[in-house]
Amino acid sequence: MTGNEIRSAYLNFFKSKEHMILHSFPLIPENDPSLLLIGAGMAPLKPYFTGKLVPPSYRVTTSQKCIRTGDIDNVGRTARHHTFFEMLGNFSFGDYFKKEAISWAWEFLTEVLALDKDKLYVTIYPDDTEAYDYWHNMIGLADERIFKMEDNFWEIGEGPCGPDSEIFYDLGPERGCGQPTCTVGCDCDRYLEIWNLVFTQFDRDANGEYHPLEKKNIDTGAGLERLASVIQQKESNFETDLIYPIIEQVLSICHREYSDPSDKVALKVIADHIRAITVMISDGILPSNEGRGYVLRRILRRAVRFGRVLGITDIFLAGLVDTVIEILGGEYPELIEHKKFIKKVIETEEKQFSATLAQGLALLKETMDASGDNKVLAGSEVFKLYDTFGFPVELTEEIAQEHGIAIDRDGFEKAMKKQQERARAARHDAAAKVATPDTTHLDQGKLTNDVHAVTAEVVMLGKDGIEIKEAHDGQEVTVILDINPFHAEGGGQLGDTGVLTSAFGKVVVEDAKALPNGLVYLIAAVEEGVVHCGDVMDIAVDTDRNLAMARNHTATHLLQAALRRVLGDHVNQAGSLVTPERLRFDFTHFSPITTQELDQISDLVNTEILKAIPITIEEMPIAAAKEKGAMALFGEKYGDIVRVVTVDDFSCELCGGSHVANTSVIGSLRILSESGIGTGVRRIEAVTGAAALEKSQADVKELEIIASLLKTKSEEIPEKLEHMLTQMRETEKELQDLKKKEVLSGVDSIIAHKETIAAVSVVTAQADVDSIDELRDLADTILDRLRGGVVLLGAIHADKINFVCKVAKADTAKGLHAGKIIKAAAQAAGGNGGGRPDMAQAGGKEPQHINEALKAGYRAIYDVLEK
């Protein structure tokens, strides 16, 4: 069976057992800030396991795309480690339990996949007599093939947990360690875990006590790649048809054989990483220096580096995407849909990194060589590789470890903090999320959303994830109303705010959010009195704030349509933020937008605003929306019925946000800035409505102030400035010429102190210049006047020293090396450095030791010439 056939067989088998097949969820977790990426089949289903939401079916089966990077260093070095893998799973939410999970697992493995029953072994938790009875008495496994293991218990702190049962396959003694004690649980490759059945039957409380769950769940996970390796009888997952075709393509590029162990590691790393890269981009993740984007960038650049190990110096990763999609595209059509874009992102990122990779590797080697007996790479050097050459710190660490050198992580982090405060937006508001209580007992058919509602009944109150009956002055709570007029946060738009009042108290609504099933809950604070479950409240949504956001939200739709018209159909939304004050729109594009293009985009949007076009909002099946040409948010998962927002024939998008009734309500749009925020991603920030008017008024006032300072009229500012700039440039040139003459006039006095060692002219001196460029120019001039020899100059700037050393080409043959001379000088002044034999520059941190430094450099010259 092929890997694709195994996946299909698994899903269809459980479909026959009345499971609903769900398409893989995107890798970006929905409403779960505790996770950066989906790493297990159960992760997107957590709300159903915890009972917070009613599942679409009480039996579900999936093949879930997963990313894990915790063991990235082992990828390619072992048979089973991956960054991307597919987890097959069947799940029960309070429906069937151990008997069915065990019998169906056995049936699928032995009858559908036809695995040899005599090669299957299981592990159980020692106290789980129920699982033992099913394996022993129902399935018929002998005692010696059932292993009791203390670690067969799945739990993560408080909450649902329970014993698990792992299924192992015996790959044969030839794959083992040969020890007489070799059995299930041995670290060798003989016994391979292929499936884990988790029996969630307890709820662990804060005191560590275990309470039986009323609704017991089943959570299973089987690695598709592992099953393929067993069925296809391959030594590792990498030789299966799910991965090996990629390795074959890499081999055709590098012209090597799949035999050399070191080459094998590189080949496996590249094949694994390009799968992860392709799938991550298809789910809307783009390279950046934070969060998920950093994970992608790290994996991609690691793949490029291993390409160099195989001798591949050309751009090659994007060329592997077709092979990945040939393998996975049938199950994941989003890969096919975004193929062109995926390739472009990879190509752009690889080009950027390749441009500096060779320089960075050279610097890293030079730094490691210079470390001598010190087996720790300075944090400042690690940061330089990150900041200047784009080396993820993990990549530097991996390369250093290959040479037996550690890195100073603390020093790196300190250098990073000095440069900037890195906002980790992907996980920033994890602490701010208010846990909602169990909502499954609510009759959601009776809960409605109505933007015109002015009164509603409180049907649920919650605090810290627990349902409560009343809340008092000063308490933070979650509130669910039977008729909800508040728009929930989503699609980049902030949630509504407002006030709820009754005869008993006043509640200030600070935010509105939605659960995955669409149920809106309010995050609120009781400001006065008390609020009870069942209270009928008067509602005052902040409509001015909502209208300001609606203006900005509709403007983002017009902006995206204008971007696609001006820049091309490759433009897709990559993120947005809609607040009452402004809008931010991130989009896919691979070069800066010119001023002319920005003007065109702005004109297009404002033309549509002035047309006063009514906004049409409809709900329809997703197939009809696609046929209508509605734009979908890149990487978003949609339900069967979607909301379509249309602006005549200009814009048509799937969206659940707030919008104005007519484009004229927007007033106008003013673009404030356009910038790049990552590989292939640009950002536009803009304002509309009152904020756009205020911006225009502020610009006029600023121009009036500038005109007053320049003593001219507003319309004559450009001409006046051009005249002043011309005068400034002429003055600066005159000053530079004077400075150069002054510096050169000191050349004779410096040369007057030259010495001759073994017939070589030597000059070491302190110079009075303003920059390292002037210091280099001075060294060149002196060397030209000497017509050979060696020049070492030092100059103090602020609280440090700059050094430059030049050696005539002919004199390098005598053993003189500028890099070694300057290193000796710099170290005497608290610095370090190096360079080429004929030219080097370095810095020192102790300006008071400049004379000692120049003497140290002189000694280095003397020792070479008089040896």
Image (tube, grey):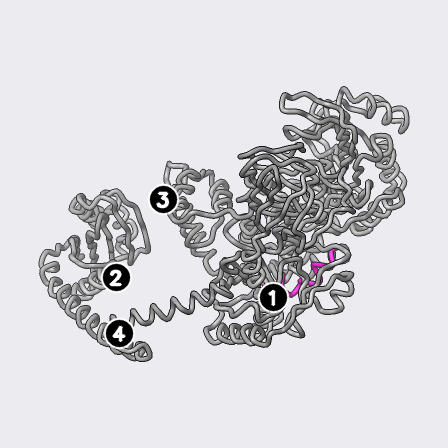
The label shown at residue 557 is 1
The Cα–Cα distance between marks 1 and 3, rounded to whole angstroms, is: 55 Å
Under circle 3, the secondary element is helix
Which of discs 2 and 3 lies nearer the camera? The answer is 2
Residue behind mark 3: 370
**Mark 2 or 4, nearer chain start:** 4
**Mark 3 or 4, nearer chain start:** 3
Q: Are marks 1 and 3 in contact (CB under 8 Å)?
A: no
Which of discs 3 and 4 lies nearer the camera? The answer is 4
The Cα–Cα distance between marks 4 and 1, rounded to whole angstroms, is: 41 Å
**Mark 1 or 3, nearer chain start:** 3
Determine if the magenta segment contains residue 337.
yes
The Cα–Cα distance between marks 1 and 2, rounded to whole angstroms, is: 50 Å
Residue behind mark 2: 773
Residue at position x 45%, y 67% from top? 693
The Cα–Cα distance between marks 2 and 4, rounded to whole angstroms, is: 24 Å
**Mark 2 or 3, nearer chain start:** 3
